[in-house]
Amino acid sequence: MKQNSLLFIGSLVFLVVDSSLIASDAVTSGEFIVEPSTFHNLGFEWKIEGDDNRNATVAVSYRAVGTNAWKPAQPLLRIGDEKVWRAKEFLEYWTPRMFAGSIFGLEPGQTYECRFEMSDPDGVSGQSIIRAPVQTRSFPKPYEGGRVLHVYPPYYDGPRQEPSFTGLLQAYYGPGLGDWDVVHRRPAQPGDTILVHAGLYKADRRDYVNPHQIPFHGTYVLTLDGTAEKPITIKGAGDGEVIFDGDNVYRLFDVMASDHHIFEGITVRNTEIAFYAGLKDVLGCSNLTVQNCRIEDVGIGIHTEWAGSKNFYIADNVMIGRDDHYRLNGWNRMTTYGPAPVNSYYGVKVYGQGHVICYNKVSFFHDGICISTYGLPEEDQDLKCVSIDIYNNDVFLSVDDFIETDGGVHNIRVMRNRGFNAAHHGLSAQPMFGGPVYFIGNLVYNVPFGGAIKTGGANPAGVLVYHNTFIAENSNASGISNAHYRNNLFLGTNHPNKPVLRQRNYTSYSSADYNGYRPNQNGLAKFMWAVPENRIRDYELTLPFGEYASLQEFQKATGQEEHGILVDYDVFVNMVPPNTETPHAVYQPDSVDFRLQRRSAAIDVGMHLPNINDGYTGEAPDLGALEFKCKDEIYGPRNL
């Protein structure tokens, strides 16, 4: 711990004061960081010193290069001095003083001029205005000028397009049998497209000279590199289904050492891990694309925990796990039939930067889509988990949670996803190391043993929750810091042990407003809210809850939800809540309709959030995920 000291010179005594201990309400700007871009969003960080009273702000605007009009975006989130910890794993992290945030809804491959203005009534030292040109990423695609290599299954005896190869590895590395399968004399080149023709590709790894050239471990180990302009593409030829059957091996495609690969239009089945793309502290790949594929009968779909992995694009895939297809069951002993075995762990888990996971259908896994619960953030900026997009996915029947952002650091964006039937929670943010994590426009239905958003025992910091529809309670007993809720719908299911809102806030500056609630009719307090008294932060686990019998009482006592309202299920076109007396029941997405009824209480009562809800159709934005009269969202693959 820093402290002042005494300096003796002769008979004089001087007090030496560490300047970092002097309180400073003025803000000093520091390093500005542009995170890796995605196709539609940009992320930024701006480090600071001072601003002890937390009243500095950063306004954000942007425009496409070549246009004149500036558009407002969301202000950057003020972060700093929040404690993130998990006692069981001896994890403790204090967020650094900084601002961070995103600009949304941009066009791929376009350059934007982004403007950031720091203000503070107490004064700004250093640079107060930054203008940065930033280009969004373009979608990966096969190189049109490369070679086309044709792959056929063993024992295929029909006509062939040339050059032709038997089995994938013969095209990828060149021929080799037995011990010679590691002698790569004619490997594929950057820009090659390997067209895999219809058939079953199932190797017998016990066959010393099997025609697939699969070694004894049974894995396609791919180690070549493409480039951004010239990726290596492995693609179904379009003449029928291409099935890679793993014959129950541990991992089928090991791509940890291969950058800039595209997999498209193939089926992978019967393996514990379909695509193994990175191992923490060892090795991992970047620029992996898996699109329009079917991944079934697997334990894990796509996995990387390598902090250096960047720019994955996981889109329009169907992923089907091995967990119970017919009943909802959790992993702990609170559930009637629990704990459920982990037959399938997760559809996707990533760490690193710049990943985009969108339009996938993920069913029957322990968790649907996850960021790795990695532990403390790395010191190296290039290894921090930032700028990740998870949007328009359809997650069905999870033993634990639909989407987990646990382990993320800054600018994790979870948007417009739909989740039906998770035993424990819909969305998870435990831990989030400063944030922001954005939960925007998501639909959550039937989470009987948990709630809308999980903070768990890891006490996240920096959680922004906007325009979601939760047919579930937001009812956590554990704590959260620097969390803000706007324009959401939380509809209680009359769970016997939960209020519709229960939140322990370790920071006095967490906030909730413009949300709609359906309180539970269960004899408990309708709202429970804990907040530090007479201080800005308090990390005592015993921080007591205030209990409030009505929304009006909650508003008056806490100053929260000044514009909050009460709603009921009649705000929707067709909504029947899940039955709490049958918590293991499974509900289908077409059994309810989340669209708002004309003239319902949730219409035109929201808060305008620039760059989030600019396209609202009435006098003000509506509450929940779906704006009245707006286009229908697509959940899951666009090609089905």
Image (tube, helix red, strand yellow):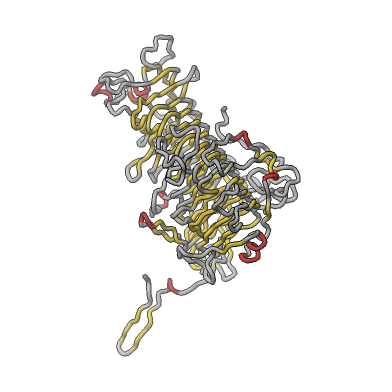
Q: Nearer the viewer, residue 280 or 58?
A: 280
534 sits to left or right of 6? right
**Going by the picture, which residue comes out furthest to the bottom?**
11
Residue furthest out toward the left: 179
Q: Is any atom of residue 60 visible in this view?
A: no
In the image, 89 versus 127, the foreground residue is: 89
Left or right of 200? Residue 113 is right
The residue depicted at 50 percent of the width and 32 percent of the height is 326
The quarter of the rendered structure image containing the N terminus is bottom left
Using the image, determine if residue 491 lies above or below residue 52: above
Residue at (49% x, 32% y) in the render: 325
Indicate the position of residue 80 as horizontal and vertical percent values.
48, 62
**Quadrant assignment for the C terminus:** top right
Residue 508 to residue 478: above or below: below
Asked whether the viewer can see residue 8, the reply is yes
Q: Residue 132 or 482: which is nearer the viewer?
A: 482
Residue 283 appears in which quarter of the rendering? Answer: top left
